[in-house]
Amino acid sequence: MKLSLLTLVLMLLAGSVAADRPNIVFMLADDLGYGDLACYGNPVIQSPNLDQLAEDGLRLLNCYAASPNCSPARTAIMTGRSPYRVGMYDWARFMSMHIPADELTLPEVIGGADYQTMFAGKWHCSGDSNLISGTQPNPGDHGFNHWLAHPRNFGQNPKGFFRNGEALDQLEGWMSEIVVDEAMEFIGNRDPERPFMSVLWFSEPHTPVEAAREFIEPYETAEVAEKAKTIKKGGPQVSWGSKEGQGPTYYGCVTMLDHHIGRLMNYLDEQGISENTIVIFTSDNGPEHRPGSSFGSPGDLRGAKGHMHEGGYKVPGIIRWPGQIKAATTSREPVNGTDFLPSLAAAAGADYQPEKVVDGINVFPAFVESEKLERPIPMMWWLFHARGGKEVTMRVGDNKILANMLPQREITVNDAAPPEGMAIMDFIKEAELGNFTMYNLKEDPNETTELSQVQPEKLDELKKQMIQLHEEIRAEGPVYGLDRSKK
C-alpha cells in the first residue's frame, strides 16, 4: 500500500498503528439550515448534544454542501466529485439518475483500508424507488458491508426500508431513532480488532416534519413564539410557505434529532471508543422554505434551499477528533462536501488513488496542523433549476461569482427553466453562462454588496476561470433522458 506523506504524518500524530486508526461516524441532516442550531445562533431551537459536540471539537464557519439540493450533495460526499461530473443533475426524481457503479466511493475507499462499514438512513443516490431492483447500485453495491436504507424521506413507523437487500416490514420508531438504533447495533456487534465507519443520513428536518410530543411541547409557549420572530429567513428573495402554529413541530423535530445523536455519542462513551473516533456532523443543503412546515433558518445568510446564494448550501459543520483537533475551536477555512472522502481517506490511511478528477481536497491539515490549504479546483455549485435568479456559482478564495444559464425561459427568483421546446438535458449541456455578479465573502458574507461594477478586472478574471471549469464539468457529465418514469 502506498501511503502519502500526509497520511503518515496523521497516523504518527495519532500515535497509531493500523489497529488503532480512528473509527469514523459521519452524520448528515436533511434540510438543516446554517442557523438551525443553538451553537450557530438560533434563538429558539435547543440542541444541547450537538452544541456539546461543537464544544468538544471544531465548529466550521464556512462549511458548504456541494449543492443546494439533496441528491447532488450526497453524491459529492460519496465520490469527492462535483455531482454534475457524476451525472446527479437534480434530486432523485428522475429515474435515470444514480451514482454509476464505476465511481470510486467513500465506503469502497475506507473499506479497502480494512474498515467495517455501514450505512443507515435516507439513500436518495439513485432514481429507483426499489433499492433492490438491480437496475442501479444500492449501498451494498457501493461498498457498505451493512446497510439499512430508505429510498426517500420517511416519518414515524415507516414502511419501505431495505436491510442488506431484503425488504422489511413496517419499522417502529421515529426517523433518527431508527437510524441511531441501527448504528449502535452495528457498533456493538463489530469486530473490535478492526476500525469501523458508520455513515448515518437522517431524514430530519425534511418533510414530513414530525416529532414526538415530548420534543414539541417545550416550544408551545408565548415566549418561544416571541423569540421566533427574530429568526432570520434568508431575505426577500425567499418565498416562505410557513403556516402559523407549525413552528413548534419544526423546532421539536430538530431537537429530537439532537436527542438521538446524543444517545449515539453516549454509546460511544460507554463502548470506550470516543477518544479514537472521528465524528462529523453536517447537512445536505440549506433550509426548505416552501411547505407549510418550513421554519428553518439560514441565519444571517441570503437565500435558502435551492438558491445559489450562501443560504442555499452553507450549512452547519462540526468535527470532533480527540487528540488531533483542538476542542472548543472554530475555523473559517472553506470546506465543501467533496472534501470528506479525501479527508477521511487520509485519516484512515487508505490507499486512495482515484482515476477520475476529484474536486475535493484533504482539509484535515488545516485543522490538525494549522496548514494553509491549496485548492487546485475551485468550489463550484450548479443546479439547472435553481431559485433566486442564478444557477451556477464559484468561490475562489474570498471571492464568489454567480451566473445564469442562458438562454432560459424567464429569469426570476422562481425556479429556472429552459426555453420552451428545449429539453432539460440540452439545457444542461448547451446553455452558456452570463449575467455575472460578484461578492467578497470575507467582507460581506451575507452578499449585500455586488462588486462587478466596482472590480471589473477581478470579475473578468473569475469569469474566465468559471467558464472554463463549467465547460470541463459539463463535458464530463453523462447524457441521458431526464424523465420521472423511465429508467
Image: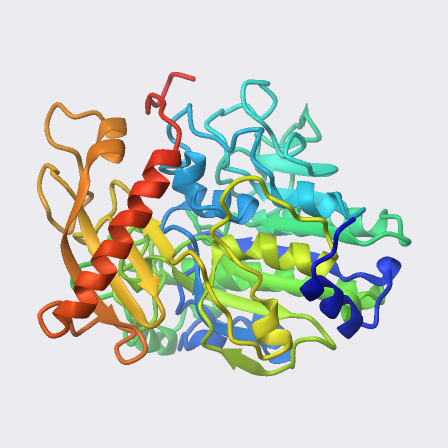
Side (left or right) of 261 relative to 405: right
Which of the pair 238/477 is nearer the observer? 477
Which of the pair 20/436 is nearer the observer? 436
Residue at image position (24%, 48%) is 391
Side (left or right) of 433 relative to 100: left
Where, by quadrant of the figure, is residue 376 drawn? bottom left
Which of the pair 181/389 is nearer the observer? 389
Residue at image position (17%, 37%) is 417
Side (left or right) of 351 relative to 431: right
Q: Position of residue 477 (x, y in %)?
A: 39, 34
Where, by quadrant of the figure, is residue 265 drawn? bottom right
Q: Quadrant of the C terminus?
A: top left
Please give the count of numbered marks on the rendered protein. Answer: 0
Where, by quadrant of the figure, is residue 135 drawn? top right
Asked whether residue 23 appears in the rendered view, the answer is yes
Residue at image position (76%, 62%) is 22
Side (left or right) of 116 relative to 383: right
Residue at image position (42%, 39%) is 85
Q: Position of residue 337 (x, y in %)?
A: 49, 55
Q: Position of residue 245 (x, y in %)?
A: 32, 60
In the image, residue 15 sits, relative to residue 132, either above or below, namely below
In the image, residue 154 sits, relative to residue 309, either above or below, namely above
How was the colour assigned to the protein in this rendering? rainbow
In the image, residue 446 sits, relative to residue 339, either above or below, namely below
Single out the residue that lies furthest toward the right.
Answer: 193
In the image, residue 168 sits, relative to residue 252, either above or below, namely above
Asked whether residue 291 appears in the rendered view, the answer is no
